[in-house]
Amino acid sequence: MFTGPGKDTRFRLSETQSKALAEAYGTPLYVVDETLFRVRIREYKAAFASAYPDSEITYAAKANSTLAVLKIAYDEGCTIDVASEGELRAALLAGVPAGACHLHGNNKQRHELEFAISQGVAHIVVDNFSEIDTIQEILKTQPNENPRLVLRLAPGVDPKTHAKISTGQADTKFGFNIADGSAEEAVKACLEKKLNLYGVHCHVGSQLVDPEAQRSGGELITAFAAKMKSIQDWSARYINVGGGLGVRYTQEDKPMGLEDYCRLVVFSVQSALDGSELKPKLAQEPGRSLIAEAGVTLYTVGVRKTVPIGPGQTRTYLCVDGGLSDNPRPALYGAVYDVELAARSDFDWEYQTDGPGAASVEPLGDATYTINGKHCETDRLFPNVTLPASVKQGDLIQVLVTGAYNASMASNYNRYQRPAMAIIKCDGTHALIARRDTWEEMFAREIIGTQSPQSTEIREIN
């Protein structure tokens, strides 16, 4: 229904929905479409199972760990990949049993491991030798627990994506390097300590429109597992090739279809399995691939300003009521989004623009804008956006494909409240699934620990 290269699967709000949601919950507002999210999970699971029946899809909570989102993912048959104690607690609060959660992290603290083991997580993705030792020590005090361990490997694959979301190359903080022998030493250490070594894992990067890195990473870690069967007599029961399949952030993006992608990954794994006698469960852990296109962010247009940028040239800024604190990805990664007019304001604002070329009548056609936020930064969100030339204060715009890594990376920078999140349910109605921060919550954890100058002696500084 939705998958396949060339098909625009991205969720959009209608004008009626946009107005109703803005009136009900205010803006900025994250919105998730439940139907598209569920369909995407089902299609991914079906495509993977068709290529490899003994398969598992685990949802990467870091993409969007809102409780309602985690519950939907679990209800649709996903296990949940958590990268911290906080994400594990979120999954538990969402009704996901610990036995359906996988704990990740490159620098897990002892208390995180103790909590995960005490709750009975499905497995722990082990990242380093210190962690192996810590787990062994914890199990001495919890002798009835025997968590399954999965080694995260660095296969030495350099994916074609942004450097800040590239994780599978040899020069990385994540996992045991295959090339320098660390991965084999980790297998030996687990076996010598009689730990329950279950399988291997890699994650080469995010937003991979070219699947070659994913294919290569899967092949390399599977070949490593086959080698360990031969020389260490250890049989991997589980191989996780990670996530990373790109989504359509802009109209120009054309990610590979799910069916073709899964067939390609499975073929590379099966080729490496040939002759090994291994019959592992095969897993993928998509996050962005499942939730990103099911989300939009709704903003209200505020100040419109036209400024000179050179002889006879101007730039028109549209400032919206959000910015860096609700979407840091443009500043962090240079992320690009498609932006569309969602609804005209019901107020009869007189059209005007500041600066050179100010107009008093509504212009026709389209214009190019730079959309900025309201933070005390340059805070450029979306450059070179084409919208009607008549866009004005009070209009609503929607930014597509913000279901992943927007709400989960939001902050209170400049003391702005993090936005609410609403869901469009399968029956077409909407509901709040995360409310906007209150001022009381923002300041509740802070303590004024100093004394008033009137109540203490001030030392003179010479």
Image: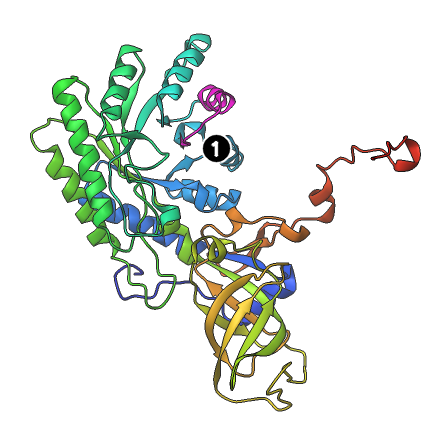
Residue at image point 42% right, 62% down: 336
Q: Quadrant of residue 283?
A: top left
Q: How far across and how far down the image is residue 67, in percent?
A: 52, 42
Can see residue 177? yes
- Specify whether 69 is left or right of 358: left
Q: Is residue 241 above or below residue 427?
A: above
Extreme residue toward the front, this view: 462
Q: How far across and how far down the image is residue 279, in percent?
A: 16, 29
Residue at image point 7% right, 29% down: 275
Q: Is residue 453 above or below residue 327?
A: above
Extreme residue toward the right, this view: 454
Residue interval drawn in magenta: 103-119
- Specify whether 284 is left or right of 227: right
Q: Is residue 104 above or below residue 268?
A: above
Residue at image point 70% right, 48% down: 438
Q: Quadrant of the N terminus?
A: bottom left
Magenta highlight on residue 263:
no
Q: Quadrant of the C terminus?
A: top right
Q: Which residue is mark 1?
A: 84
Characterize the local packing of mark 1: few (<14), some (14-19) or many (20 or more) Cα atoms within 10 angstroms. many
Element at badge 1? loop
Viewer-nearest residue: 18 or 196: 196
Amino acid type, label 1: Ser
